[in-house]
Image (cartoon, helix red, strand yellow):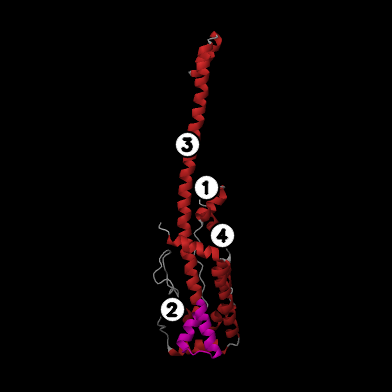
């Protein structure tokens, strides 16, 4: 309508009307652009707030996973060292306790990484929506650390794990897993946090079966060598998680304190 009147005024050479209508036209276009910009900025702020909240929640779960795995592998390391000490003669364990620790020395755990939000931000090019620079820095570092993957891989490929599985009867292994294996804990639950694997258990097997399995491990000259390797590998990764990746470790401790 305004454009039609403006065109008619040009034909009639009504300069006053032309000036007024031109100004109104320019102001209308300007306001339209501003409203569009305001809407875009509002949508961007909303998306930024949503993605920031999602990323914070993901990193809180990652923080729990990080601390959980630190506690878990510390327990695995301790079980491995106790088994090695029993073999080397520097400590005494009954065959029952020896077998439980020897089994726990084979264990590994990874847990699913909570990284869907970060991957979405990267794949869509929206990582700039995270205005909290410290939060973004923690996310970039946390999701690029390969230490946990390396620790899991070493657990899967551990020669000691292979030796144990080849030496101990399958029925005994099943009993160990059912009666003395890992306990499930929901992500975010810190109760009994450091006793997922290091807890008192009753291995209900005949003494003869326990003695036979323990003797098979004690008699193999490679057992002690592989146990020592396992201890060294785990300690290296634990040092990485708390030392070389100290910024991630401290960032996770800080975000764990924040209220959801």
Which residue matches tag 4? Answer: 141
Q: In terms of sequence position, does the residue under pointer 1 or pointer 4 come before the other?
A: 1
Cα gap from disc 3 to disc 1, whole angstroms: 16 Å
Q: Position of residue 242 (x, y in %)?
A: 54, 69
Which residue matches tag 2? Answer: 180
Q: For residue 87: magenta?
A: yes
Element under label 2? helix
Q: For residue 258: magenta?
A: no
Magenta segment range? 76-103
Cα gap from disc 1 to disc 4, whole angstroms: 18 Å
Give the quadrant of residue 142. bottom right
Task: Tell me the quadrant of the picture where the C terminus can be found.
Answer: bottom left
Which residue matches tag 3? Answer: 39
Farthest residue in the top direction? 12
Q: Position of residue 149 (x, y in %)?
A: 56, 66
The disc at residue 129 is 1
Q: Vertical placement of 212 versus 5: above or below?
A: below
Q: Residues within 10 Å of mark 2 (few under 14, many from 20)?
A: many
Q: In terms of sequence position, does the residue under pointer 3 or pointer 1 come before the other?
A: 3
Q: Vertical placement of 36 versus 45: above or below?
A: above
Which residue does the image show at 50% across and 75% down from the upper left?
Answer: 74
């Amino acid at each position: 309508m305004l454009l039609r009147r403006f065109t008619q005024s040009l034909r009639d050479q009504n300069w006053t009307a032309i000036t007024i209508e031109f100004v109104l036209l320019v102001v209308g276009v300007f306001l339209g652009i501003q409203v569009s910009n305001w809407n875009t900025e509002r949508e961007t702020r909303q998306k930024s707030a949503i993605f920031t909240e999602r990323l914070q929640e993901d990193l809180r779960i990652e923080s729990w996973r990080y601390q959980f795995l630190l506690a878990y592998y510390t327990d695995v390391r301790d079980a491995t060292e106790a088994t090695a000490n029993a073999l080397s003669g520097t400590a005494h364990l009954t065959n029952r306790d020896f077998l439980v620790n020897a089994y726990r020395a084979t264990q590994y755990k990874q847990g699913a990484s909570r990284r869907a939000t970060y991957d979405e931000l990267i794949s869509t090019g929206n990582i700039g929506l995270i205005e909290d620079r410290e939060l973004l820095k923690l996310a970039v570092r946390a999701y690029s650390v390969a230490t946990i993957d390396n620790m899991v891989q070493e657990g899967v490929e551990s020669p000691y794990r292979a030796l144990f599985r080849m030496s101990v009867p399958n029925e005994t292994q099943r009993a160990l897993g059912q009666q003395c294996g890992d306990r499930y804990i929901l992500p975010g639950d810190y109760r009994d946090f450091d006793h997922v694997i290091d807890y008192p258990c009753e291995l209900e097997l005949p003494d003869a079966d326990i003695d036979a399995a323990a003797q098979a491990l004690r008699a193999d000259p490679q057992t002690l060598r592989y146990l020592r390797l396992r201890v060294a590998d785990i300690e290296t990764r634990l040092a990485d998680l708390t030392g070389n990746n100290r910024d991630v470790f401290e960032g996770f401790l800080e975000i764990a304190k924040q209220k959801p």
